[in-house]
Each structure stands twice: as C-alpha cells, then as structure tokens.
Image (cartoon, helix red, strand yellow):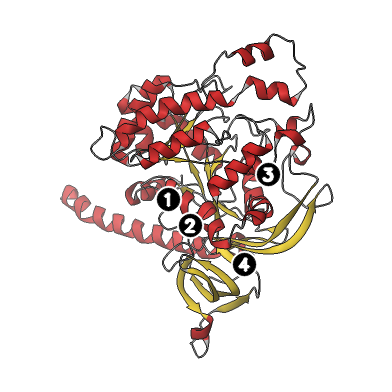
Amino acid sequence: MDYMLQWRVLPLLTLLASFLFLFYVQHSSKSSHKECSLLPYQHYWITSKRIVTPQGVISGSVEIKEGKILSIVKEEDWQGKSKVGHIVDYEEAVVMPGLIDVHAHLDDPGRAEWEGFPSGTKAAAAGGITTLVDMPLNSFPSTVSQETLKLKIKAAKERIYVDVGMLSNLYLSLLIILGLVFLTILPTGFWGGLVPENAFNASALEALLNAGVLGLKSFMCPSGINDFPMTNASHIKEGLSVLAKYRRPLLVHAEIQQDSEIHLEAKDGSDDAHSYSTYLKTRPPSWEEAAIRELVAVTKETRIGGLAEGSHLHIVHLSDSSSSLELIKEAKNGGDSITVETCPHYLAFSSEEIHDGDTRFKCAPPIRDAANKEKLWEALLFVLPVTWSYGRKYGVTLEQLALWWSERPAKLAGQELKGAIATGNLADIVIWEPDVEFDLNDDYPVFFKHPSISAYMGTKLSGRVLATFVRGNLVYKEGKHAPAACGVPILAR
C-alpha cells in the first residue's frame, strides 16, 4: 500500500517542483532586470533618422519587447500607429546591429592578468560589440576538451558583460537546473581547440562539439602556449571531416615556419633586434603563403560531393595581401568552402610608421608595408571607430559596416538570431555618431585593462558609441555600464 502511495504522490511532487522552478526563474528574471539594464523598460521603441537594416538605411522606429525585435516601422508609416511602450529618440545617431567579434582572447581562466572576462567584455560593450567568441588558447588550461570547456564556462559565471553562446534546449534546461547558466552583460561564445592530441580522436572532438563550442581553432606554427601545440595539414583534414556533420567552421592561424635565407639572416644576430624591419624579416609573407597553399589543397574536400562537404575553413587575421589572398580567391572561386578575415590594425597601420622598439605594434602575422595595406582595403571594398575612421576615405558605407561587423560574423558563428536589425531577431543594437571625432589619449575615458599598450593611443578617431543594447538590455550608455553582468552564454545547438 505504501508502495502504491509513493507512486501516486511522486508525480504530484515533481509537478509542484516544476511550477516552483518556473516561478523562481520568472521572478528572478523580473527582479534582476533593473540591475541588467540602464533602461527600466522591457517594452520600448528606438527611433532614429538612420536605422541600418538588411534592406538599407531607413528613418523610423524599432519596437523591442522582452529582448527581441518585435517590429520595424518606417517613418512614413509611423504617424497614426498605436504605440505601446516607452520611446527613446536618438534623432540623427545611427542605429545599427551590434558588432560581433569572432576572434577574442579573454585569457580567462588562468591568465586573467593579461585581460580577463570582466575587463574584456566591458571594453567590448563600450565599443558597440554585443557578442564575443573567445579563442581556446591563452587561458589556462586551453579549451581542447569537454572538461576544459566546462572550466571556462564556470570561470565566466557572473563575470562577463556580453553574450557568450547558445546550445540545444534540452541541454540548456539541464544547465539551468544545475545552476550552470548565468547572467552576463555581453554574449560570449567559445571556440574549441584542434590540437594533435585530439585531431585523430573523433570521439574526443565530438564530445567537445556536443558540449557547445561553436567550431574549432588550430595553429600551423608554434602558438607560444605549451598546451596548444601546432597542427599540420593531416590534423586539419581530420578535423574538417568531423566538423562536416556538425556544419561548423575550423579557424586556422595560417603561418608555416620556414628557414628562408632572409629569416636565417635575421636570426643570426647581424640585424638589430629592436628594429621593426628585423621583426618583419623573421615572419615574411612566404610563411602565410606556404600555410595557405597547404590549406587550399585540403579545402577541395569541402566542395559539394567532397569527403568534408558541410565543413568550412576560415583563415584568421590575414596580413599578406599578395600571393596568399590570390590563393584564397582561386579556392573560393573553385567552390571551396573557405573565408578569410583581416584585422583593424592591418588596415590602419603600416610598417613604415612603426618606430623601432615600440612593441605595442608587435603581432603575428606582422603589420606589413603601406602598399600591402592598400591592397587589403582594395580586397575589402573590407573596432567600429577604427574601421569607420580609416575606411571612410575608401567609400565604406554604413551598410558595408553592418555586413562586415555583424551579419557575416553572425553567420560564421552560427547565430541566426543575431547580426541584423530584423523582426524576430535578438535586440543586439549599437547606437553611435559617425561624424563625432575624438582624440584617443590619456584623457579619454577608455575601458582597456592596459591602456598604455594600445597601438591606437594618440590617434584621432571618428565614430562615438552612445549606447549598446544586448538582448534588449541597455548595458552601456555614454561611459556608464549596467550594474550587473547580464548577457547569456552562447553554445552551439
């Protein structure tokens, strides 16, 4: 009898627990909204004379409710429309989809003194970036397994100010129940690492992908991190074959170390080690070209009917605008699933203007000469203030900025509800004034952890960020951040 009673009572207790849990989630969400947003409304309108949409720049209004874009109304249709909710009028300021940075090194856990989740994501919000995807190395340990991904997610708890990733509904529900889903200000996603120890272990890679990484990252040269060794073409080929069924990308640092004559001369001590020209010699364009030649031989398998059809290869931070870029164009025209990115510093600076010993400009691949920079811009005709400031003389438009900084990165990271101001999308939005100029110096309120080592200090930029919205929360407004970090982790579905 007692046994039968238990079986009758147990479902009722389970149902009661479910109702209590749902009440707690809803209640905690409402009570925490004031901490998450500088705007005390969950239903409101943003109006502006310049709203950047996939259909072009319009004058009108964007209706936002509970974190999503409910409707978009042109100015001519606005008159007479019933308006429910608060109205925030930004007048002539540009309303654009929030920027998505798919190549961030937040160095957390383990090396937070380099950057860290709080400072890195606060800086992102101040720059109009609403989503970051964190690289698998520079933290310790590197994110190369399901276990190390869990450590990174745990380290980010209540410490991030942008989005981080999204996963399957069942797994998300389990994480909520277990207390592993947390509030952040900016969404932040994670790449996993492809290294020799897991490249030939399909089950290990699948476990990492099933845990929610948005894709994989590998190096074809020494990374400088002991637990993130370099890979070769064989490792990359195996990685692509696993990624194919998940339809997620592999990101590659494309340099192959070569002992060319010019490289040997630089290493023998005959050149001044403090000279920037010496550093250029140690990482010539031929390093990038050699790596990309090997990669395009592998990416043939990503074509329709190939063994890795469904996978995608993305070359990160391309510096060489000559042979390397041509190889990528040829592969893409041939049907390979391949893309490439460059960086603002390659578009803003040239080797001729870098003073010897100024390590603020040291990066790999290196910043090359002015002619190389011009070719990169020609290839683009390719944060926010930097791209806009240097890009205006090339005729860059607001629509192009939205495409490069929002729509395409969202597609690469598999975020279909981000990257555009469109009905049904998440309300990730940046408000900025393109024509306002400012000097980035010690007197300007920046949010760098180490401001003195930024290569952009001392430059005049155009484009001041007024406000940043993440999932409808106003997380940054003219120098002030929301009290709490309230984004969400973004893991793959």
For the residues bearing labels 2 and 1, Cβ distance under 8 angstroms: yes
**What residue is disc 1 on?**
411
In this rendering, the answer to whether 402 lies above or below 368 is: below
Q: CA distance from mark 1 to mark 4?
A: 23 Å
**Image spot of residue 489 (x, y percent):** 48, 48
Nearest to the observer: residue 14 or residue 46: 46
Q: CA distance from mark 2 to mark 1?
A: 8 Å
Which residue is depicted at the point 35% across and 26% down? 237
Which comes sooner in the sequence, label 3 or label 4?
Answer: 4
Q: Quadrant of residue 232?
A: top left
Where disc 4 sits, the SS reads strand
Which comes sooner in the sequence, label 4 or label 2?
Answer: 4
Identified by mark 4, the residue type is Val
Where disc 1 sits, the SS reads helix
**What residue is disc 2 on?**
419
Identified by mark 2, the residue type is Gly
**What residue is disc 4 on?**
94
Q: Residues within 10 Å of mark 1 (few under 14, many from 20)?
A: few
Hey, which residue is sitting farthest right in the picture?
443
Labelled disc at residue 348: 3
